[in-house]
Image (cartoon, helix red, strand yellow):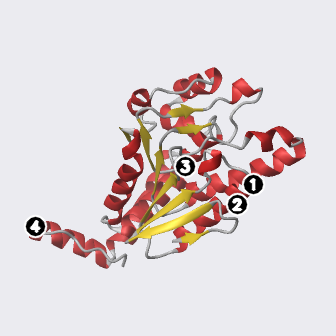
Amino acid sequence: MSEIGNGHVRIERDGRRADVIIARPEKRNAMNEATVADLTAAVEEVDADDDVRAATLLGEGSVFCAGFQLEMMHEKDVADHDEFHRAFRELLDTIDETTTPIVAGIKGAGIAGGFELTLPADLRVLGEKAKYGIIEVNLGIFPHQGSTQRLPRIVGLGKAKELVLTGDYIDPEEAAQCNLVTDVVPEAEVDDRARELADELTEKAPLGIENALEAFQTTFDVPLEDGLSTEHRLAMQVYGTRDRKEGFEAQLEGRDAEFEGQ
């Protein structure tokens, strides 16, 4: 286990999985400047570790993340808000750009900034009673850290507008139906399910996952022909690897593959 910088986030490792855990249960894991800085550093550390093949993003205690710390947000002036939100955007971009797959486990609540924190994750597990949504229009502002940009790419423009403009929580089952989350489980099982999914990813060919994520990240909003060309180029990089040969041989021989990231 390693504690990051300000002590608001820690990393726990289990085999080839790393768990990035927001550790402010007394604040319902609400984020302030120090938390955002620690999360950014933690994700960067995990992504740089060649021994880590998948990660989770979790909250200590009964709540994933209650958004931004309201007292802090209330006291800031416009310039301070601009600086803080730029730092939060850097965190989200860091999650988005990592080639280590990340599974977010959302129990209890993932509200406002806590909701937007989950959007760059690759997979999301939601508790069946969790409050999950973007409530900023109820606070005199609007969600502006991915809810008008990343969210429509996940659920479509119509559903994204509904969630942003009403400021209502989304029902967990509806979240699954519109592909916002991968799985809905009882609250007590959220972290374990997120870890289980991440463990499944650690068993896959790491170079295949890494290149697939790069293909998603670099081609989503480019013309189709350009995206297909990038996808092909990245695929050919994988075909020359030891793991590709191992994967095919294991399938032909009816055994589990042993991938080495080479």
For badge 2, the amino acid type reads Ala
Q: Is residue 238 above or below residue 31?
A: below
Label 4 SS: loop
Which residue is outermost to the left?
Answer: 253
Circles 2 and 3 in contact, beta carbons < 8 Å: no
Q: Is residue 33 left or right of residue 9?
A: right
For badge 4, the amino acid type reads Gly
Residue 120 numbered mark, or none: 3
**What is the C-alpha distance between the residues marked 2 and 3?**
17 Å
Circles 4 and 2 in contact, beta carbons < 8 Å: no
Q: Which of the marked residues, 1 or 3, is nearer the chain's N terminus? A: 1
Q: Is residue 122 left or right of residue 244?
A: right
Q: Is residue 177 above or below residue 127?
A: above
Residue 53: % across, % down: 41, 68
Label 3 SS: loop
For badge 1, the amino acid type reads Glu
Residue under numbered circle 4: 254
Residue under numbered circle 2: 37
Residue 10: % across, % down: 57, 64
Residue under numbered circle 1: 33
Q: Which of the marked residues, 3 or 4, is nearer the chain's N terminus? A: 3
**What is the C-alpha distance between the residues marked 3 and 4?**
36 Å
Crowd rating for badge 4 (residues with CA inside 10 Å; few <14, some 14–19, many 20+) = few
Which one is closest to the eye, mark 2 or mark 3? Answer: 2
Q: Is residue 70 visible?
A: yes
**What is the C-alpha distance between the residues marked 1 and 4?**
51 Å
**What is the C-alpha distance between the residues marked 1 and 2?**
6 Å
